[in-house]
Amino acid sequence: MTTLRYSLGDTGPAVNELRSKFAQLGLLRANDGVEFSDAPFDAPLDRAVRQFQLERGVTADGVVGPLTYRLLEEARWRLGDRLLSYSGSNPLVGDDVMALQRRLAELGFDVGRIDGVFGPVAENALREFQRNVGLPPDGTCGPATFKALARLAPIVTGGRPHWLREGEALRRLGPRLSGKVVVVDPGHGGSDRGATGHGLEEATVAADLAARIEGRLAATGVHAFLTRGRATPDELDEASRARFANDAGANLVISVHVDATRGTQASGVATYYYGIDRHGAFSAVGEQFAGLIQREIVARTDLRDCHTHPKTWDLLRYTRMPAVRVELGYLSNPHDAARLADPAFRDVVAEAIVVAVQRVFLSKDDDATTGALLLRDLA
C-alpha cells in the first residue's frame, strides 16, 4: 500500500481496514450499531487520524498516506509480541523496539537515539545487557530477555542518559568549525516542486538557500555537502536523504524548506527537531540546534517567530546525528514571499544558520549573544 492516500469522504475495503486499526488502538468506536464495514471515512475517523498524527509527531492533516499507514503498523507492536533482532537489510521498526530502547537506556546502556529502529547500536546494547544478566549475548530479544527486562523494570528510576551522551559526543568534537561535516538538504527537487506562491517554487528557493549556506560553511573550513545538486540525484525521499547524511558521516544536518497554505494569513519561520512526546524520545542536541537556528533567524529578520517543535519526519528520525528542518516562511503570504524573493534576505538567513552551526559547538562560557556573531568572526 505504498501509494495509498485516504481522507474524509472515501469508502471501500481500505477504509474498513483503517477503521479496524484505529479501533484496535482505542482511538475509534462504533457508533449506534453502525458496523465499521458499512461506514465511510467520516468525521470520527478523521478526528482519530488527526489525533494519531499529533501523537506520532507528523503533520496532522487527516490524510492517511504512506507515512501515517507505516506508523499505524508500528503502533500495533508491544514489547514481547515478537522476537527482536538486528537485520541490516530490513531492520525491525515499531513501538516494541522503542520500548526496548527506552528500557535499556534507563538501565544505563547506550542505545543511541531512541527512534524505534532496531539498528546495530541497539543490538550492541542488547548484547551488553544480556552479558550483565548472565544470558547468552546473542543480540536477540526473546522470552528469557523479556523476563530479565521485566524483572529489572521495578528498580529503573528513569533519567535521560542518552541525552548526556549525545551532548558529550558533540563537545568532544571541539569548538572550531574547521573539519566538521555538515549536510545541507534542499527540500523537494526534480518533478516535486513543493509549495508554490507569488511566482516562487519551494524547490528552487530551497536550493538557492542551501547553496548559500553551503558556500558560507565551506568558507569557515566545514566540509559541507548538499543532498541534491549537480553531483547527486534530484529525486530523493527523506529516508534516502538520511542515508546520504549517515554515509557522509555528518556531524549535523540542516534541511531547508518553505511552506504555503490555501489562505494568505499564515506566516513566519519554524524549526523542527526529532522528538515524540508520546514516548519521551528526543534529540537533545537537535532541540538545542533548532532553538539556536530559530533565534538567530528571528533576531536578524522580520519573519514571525513560529517557534521550535518536535517531529518524527523520516529525515529527522533516521539520521544518526542531530538534524533540523527549517521552514523559512510561507510562499502564500505576500510579505514572506517578497522577503524570500530578495537575494539579500537569503544571504541574511544563510548567515544566521551558519552562526547557529558555530554556536552549537561552543560551550556556555564561550557562546555569544543571539544576533551578535557575524560570518567574518567565524572565518
Image (spheres, rainbow, N blue to C red):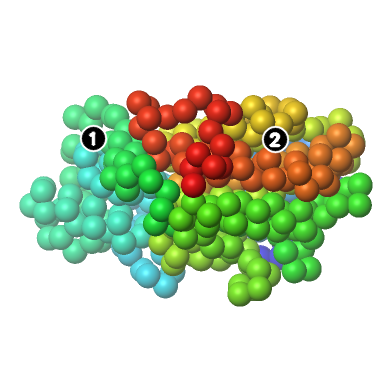
Q: Height in image: 237 above or below 291?
A: below
Residue 37 picture location, percent across and down? 73, 51
Q: Is residue 261 visible?
A: no
Quarter of the N terminus within the rendering = bottom right
- The amino acid type found where label 1 is placed reads Ala
Of pointers 1 and 2, the one earlier in the residue sequence? 1
Say left or right for 153 vs 26.
Answer: left
Closer to viewer: mark 1 or mark 2: 2
Which numbered circle lies on residue 269? 2
Q: Specify few, some or many for label 2: CA neighbours under 10 Å numbering under 14, 14-19, or 20 or more.
A: many
Q: Nearer the viewer, residue 343 or 255?
A: 343
Residue 175 picture location, percent across and down? 36, 42
Q: Nearer the viewer, residue 54 or 356?
A: 356
Corner quadrant of residue 215: bottom right
Q: Which residue is mark 1?
A: 153
* Element under disc 2: strand
Residue at the image point whose x is 65% and y is 58% from the top:
211
Q: Height in image: 75 above or below 246?
A: above
- The amino acid type found where label 2 is placed reads Val
* Element under disc 1: helix
Corner quadrant of residue 46: top right
Residue at the image point whose x is 46% and y is 55% from the top:
221
